[in-house]
Image (cartoon, rainbow, N blue to C red):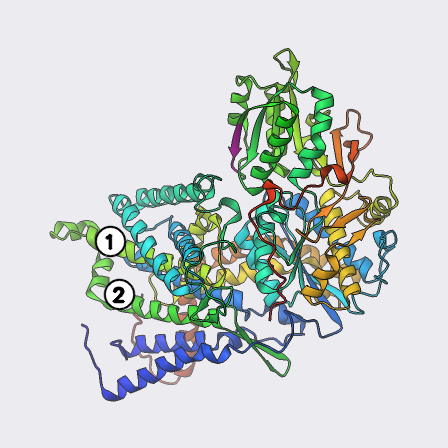
């Protein structure tokens, strides 16, 4: 069956073919002449909006996409300008970025690191995106941030709350406007103390990935500092939709506070399960049983309906804020889409403006120049009061809101009320804080 | 050539030429035209084409030849990826050790899983492999990623950090996967008129390995061993009655195809150094089954075509958004434009699964032999037209 037919000519031919094949890649090693990846040369510049359009965070992703489209409209001079009018930096003139019209491409992260990276890569390699932004999950944000560092483009993180994004996994090309788990803990602790006292037993249910772990760690540390005791911490899979098997053990654990380190659809389901099990009517150790959701959003409150009433948590921003920036944003978002924006929409809108502004101030799209313009940048008028982009870890420091599910909502959007605005100073931590240690920012990578 | 007959050599040469000129063939539309949306000639997607081609070729050695339908092949893909990234973390960014380890480790796992699963056949075999794959997924996703013992880094995915040992990493070498200094990300862009072609080092490495894998697959298909595997497919019971023990053959096929999957996983990490657990999920196992059936199970080139087809949809159709649609139909009056966008909207963007599902149904119903059968029919049709005046050849094509 197997006839060897080695002839001199055959060997020569195949040898030549193989060596040509082997030599081929080496002629492509020369780098292109551009000084950085995807230098926009035409009259337009492309940004990549990489958000979850399917999966557990699809609602947040859809809202993020609306905010991105609004931001692009405003940067290009359309609409009413939104927060560009209240932003403390006046570099943006409504004529695009550096005179180039802003175009965008979108992709679906599917809330999976692999899919998110593939989508981001296609934006960089095919569409020539000079900046990638988005992500509604810390796992995805960290994965894409790593990719952007390797490829040499700026990553403006969207909704990512894990300490690791600007802690252990921080990257020189990545920037985060959103607050993080440590800040939630620091903002919530005093409020919890005044509400529930300093002698409580807490039980944690935690989404089993980087964000859940760091939030559990942060809340545990903050509440134990108050004198609370942590009874148990249980990890739940991100893909879980029914939490009753996790809630049942809580009843017999002797705990009197349940901390739900869940977000999005997870939180909606776990909270609903907890309420169905009658946890909120229970009396343990002579105290009312309480539920805390450290990271809150209006979209989640909407999903959980009646169950959120009186439940406390923290949030990055809420549309009912009365400052000029927030009102301008809510007005233009409401005019365009007919409902108020979520905190996810707010943070990605801010990130897009901040990027555009940084390019304008730097006078170049070069990631290193942009990074330099963002580092240590202080600004105001974007809805969170005075804010600092810290140079050491690329994290924004601003006020954090402690919110509560409203008892008597006046509309379907009026679900949360702000209990307290925790000043930035109270949630600021050292760069080498143990919860953020272990990573290195590295140096900025312009690619090419 | 290389001990192949004329026809197989022809197929191999065609595949080689396609792989060599893929950056040009896949970029048929000028960069600035509206149709550029459909260009697939960028490094990431081309790499995916050939890597998933390898995965599907390997799967086809098991499924196409023996008929054993494994629903857990993604486990080997994931194991390969993790092995490769661990080599990056420990040794350095050269891709060679990573690729070898990924083949080795996935081969070991395949031996273990195959040894147990192959005691059953048919649906029981499929369920067993599915169960093993889901176990691997659960292990990678949460069990082996707790803060105390972190082998897989869970949902975030395993990646290389600056403080990893990387014993053989030296200054001057790229901080990315490379082949003796040639970065996998190195891309030469060539402008030809309105077109831009991207020649990427990582792609050509993967393509070269794919050709080797393809060649090996042809040899296996044409060997006495391959004949044994076909015998298993056609009637295993009869084979056993003749006194032959078929299990060593099926186990060998299982391990070989597991190693192919591991190699594909290793290459995925080699071109993008991050390994995520969702690579091992049952949907990923199902995907390779779809690829093989869509392309044509049991044929040589079918799985590669199927892999390309599915990856094209996943990456190109999922990126078309309403904005793009509006620009396509901008020439229509407003009402008509909105209507057209409304009609097409469910099939693009996040609805790409729907489009793929419909096409898959059409292929399975009208072309049971997959895309390869479609190609043969077109070929036959042309041949008939060309030889209309001549007498009918009366020759029947052997069915693959």
Q: Residue at 54%, 39% (x, y): give it.
A: A238
What percent of the width, then of the height, locates residue B151? Answer: 43, 46
Asked whether disc 2 touches disc 1, contact meaning CB atoms under 8 Å apart, the reply is: no
What percent of the width, then of the height, locates residue B90? Answer: 42, 56
Q: Residue at 56%, 60% (x, y): give it.
A: B315
Q: Which is nearer the N-term, disc 2 or disc 1?
A: 2
What percent of the width, then of the height, locates residue A371? Answer: 70, 60
> Can residue A217 be seen in this snapshot?
yes
Q: In which quarter of the image is the C terminus of chain B?
A: bottom left
Report whether A64 appears left or right of A247. Answer: right
What is the chain identity of the residue bearing mark 1? B
What is the chain identity of the residue bearing mark 2? B
CA–CA distance in space, label 2 to label 1: 13 Å
What percent of the width, then of the height, locates residue A4? Answer: 20, 78
Residue that mark 1 sits on: B250
Q: Which residue is at the front of the view, A132 or A422?
A: A422
Residue A223 lies in the magenta-colored region: no
Residue that mark 2 sits on: B220
Q: Give the image quarter of residue A271.
A: top right
Q: Is residue A220 above or below residue B12?
A: above
Farthest-out residue, bottom:
A9
Q: Which residue is at the front of the view, B391 or B126?
A: B126
Residue B36's mark?
A: none
Q: What kind of element bears circle 1? A: helix
Q: Give the image quarter of residue A266.
A: top right
Farthest-out residue, left:
B243
Q: Residue at 34%, 53% (x, y): give it.
A: B106
> Can residue B56 be seen in this snapshot?
no
**Magenta-tinted stretch:** A233-237
Q: What kind of element bears circle 2? A: helix
Report whether B212 appears left or right of B284. Answer: left
Q: In which quarter of the image is the N terminus of chain B?
A: bottom left
């Amino acid at each position: 069956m197997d006839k060897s037919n080695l002839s001199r000519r055959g060997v020569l031919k195949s040898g030549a073919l193989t060596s040509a094949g082997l030599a081929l890649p080496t002629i492509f090693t020369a780098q292109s002449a551009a000084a950085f990846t995807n230098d926009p040369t035409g009259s337009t510049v492309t940004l990549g909006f990489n958000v979850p359009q399917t999966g557990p965070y699809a609602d947040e992703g859809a809202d993020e996409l609306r905010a991105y489209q609004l931001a692009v409209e405003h940067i290009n001079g359309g609409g009413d300008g939104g927060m560009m009018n209240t932003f403390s930096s006046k570099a943006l003139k409504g004529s695009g970025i550096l005179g180039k019209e802003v175009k965008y491409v979108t992709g679906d992260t599917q809330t999976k690191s692999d899919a998110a990276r593939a989508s981001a890569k296609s934006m960089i390699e095919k569409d020539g995106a000079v900046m990638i932004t988005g992500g509604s999950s810390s796992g995805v944000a960290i994965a894409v941030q790593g990719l952007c560092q390797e490829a040499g483009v700026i990553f403006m993180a969207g909704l990512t709350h894990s300490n690791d994004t600007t802690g252990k996994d921080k990257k020189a090309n990545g920037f985060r406007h959103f607050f993080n788990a440590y800040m939630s803990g620091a903002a919530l602790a005093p409020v919890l103390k005044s509400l529930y006292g300093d002698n409580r037993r807490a039980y944690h249910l935690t989404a089993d990935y980087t964000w859940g772990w760091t939030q559990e760690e942060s809340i545990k540390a903050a509440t134990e500092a108050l004198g609370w005791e942590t009874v148990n911490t249980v990890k739940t899979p991100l893909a879980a939709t029914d939490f009753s098997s996790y809630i049942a053990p809580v009843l017999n654990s002797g705990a009197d506070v349940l901390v739900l380190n869940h977000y999005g659809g997870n939180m909606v389901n776990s909270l609903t399960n907890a309420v169905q099990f009658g946890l909120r009517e229970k009396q343990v150790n002579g105290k009312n049983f309480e539920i805390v959701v450290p990271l809150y959003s209006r979209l989640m409150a909407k999903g959980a309906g009646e169950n959120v009433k009186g439940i406390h948590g923290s949030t990055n921003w809420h549309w009912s804020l009365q400052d000029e920036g927030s009102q301008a944003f809510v007005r233009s978002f409401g005019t365009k889409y007919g409902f108020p924006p979520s905190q996810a929409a707010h943070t990605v809108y801010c990130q897009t403006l901040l990027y555009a502004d940084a390019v304008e101030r730097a006078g170049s799209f070069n990631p290193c120049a942009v990074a330099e313009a963002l580092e240590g940048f202080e600004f105001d008028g974007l809805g969170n009061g005075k804010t600092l982009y810290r140079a050491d870890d690329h994290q924004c420091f601003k006020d954090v809101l402690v919110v509560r599910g409203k008892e008597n909502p006046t509309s379907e959007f009026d679900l949360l009320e702000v209990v307290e605005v925790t000043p930035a100073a109270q949630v600021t931590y050292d760069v080498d804080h143990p919860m953020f240690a272990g990573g290195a920012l590295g140096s900025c990578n312009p690619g090419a | 050539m290389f001990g192949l007959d004329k026809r197989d050599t022809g197929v191999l040469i065609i595949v080689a030429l396609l792989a060599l000129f893929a950056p040009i063939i896949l970029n048929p539309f000028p960069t600035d035209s509206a149709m550029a949306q459909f260009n697939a000639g960028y490094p990431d997607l081309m790499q995916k084409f050939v890597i998933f081609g390898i995965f599907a070729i390997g799967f086809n050695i098991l499924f196409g030849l023996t008929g054993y339908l494994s629903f857990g092949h993604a486990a080997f893909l994931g194991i390969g990826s993790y092995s490769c990234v661990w080599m990056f973390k420990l040794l350095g960014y050269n891709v060679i050790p990573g690729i070898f380890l990924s083949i080795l480790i996935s081969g070991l796992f395949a031996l273990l899983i195959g040894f147990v699963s192959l005691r059953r056949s048919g649906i029981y075999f499929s369920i067993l492999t599915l169960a093993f794959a889901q176990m691997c997924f659960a292990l990678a996703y949460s069990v082996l990623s707790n803060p105390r013992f972190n082998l897989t880094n869970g949902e975030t995915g395993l990646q290389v950090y600056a403080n990893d040992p990387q014993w053989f990493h030296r200054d001057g070498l790229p901080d990315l996967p490379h082949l003796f200094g040639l970065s996998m990300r190195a891309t030469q862009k060539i402008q030809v008129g309105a077109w831009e072609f991207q020649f990427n080092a990582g792609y050509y490495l993967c393509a070269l390995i794919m050709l080797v894998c393809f060649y090996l697959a042809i040899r296996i298909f044409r060997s006495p061993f391959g004949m044994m595997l076909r015998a298993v497919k056609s009637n295993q019971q009869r084979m056993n009655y003749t006194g032959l023990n078929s299990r060593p053959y099926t186990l060998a096929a299982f391990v070989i195809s597991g190693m192919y999957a591991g190699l594909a996983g290793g290459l995925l990490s080699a071109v993008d150094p991050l390994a995520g657990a969702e690579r091992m999920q049952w949907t990923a196992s199902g995907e390779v089954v779809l690829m093989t059936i869509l392309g044509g199970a049991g044929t040589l080139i079918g799985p590669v075509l199927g892999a390309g087809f599915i990856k094209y949809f996943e990456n190109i159709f999922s990126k078309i958004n309403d904005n793009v649609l509006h620009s396509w139909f901008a020439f229509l009056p407003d009402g008509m434009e909105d209507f057209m966008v409304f009609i097409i909207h469910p099939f693009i963007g996040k609805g790409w699964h729907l489009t793929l599902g419909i096409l898959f149904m059409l292929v399975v119903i009208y072309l049971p032999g997959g895309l390869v059968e479609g190609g043969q029919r077109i070929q036959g049709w042309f041949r008939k037209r060309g030889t209309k005046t001549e007498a009918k050849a009366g020759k029947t094509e052997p069915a693959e």
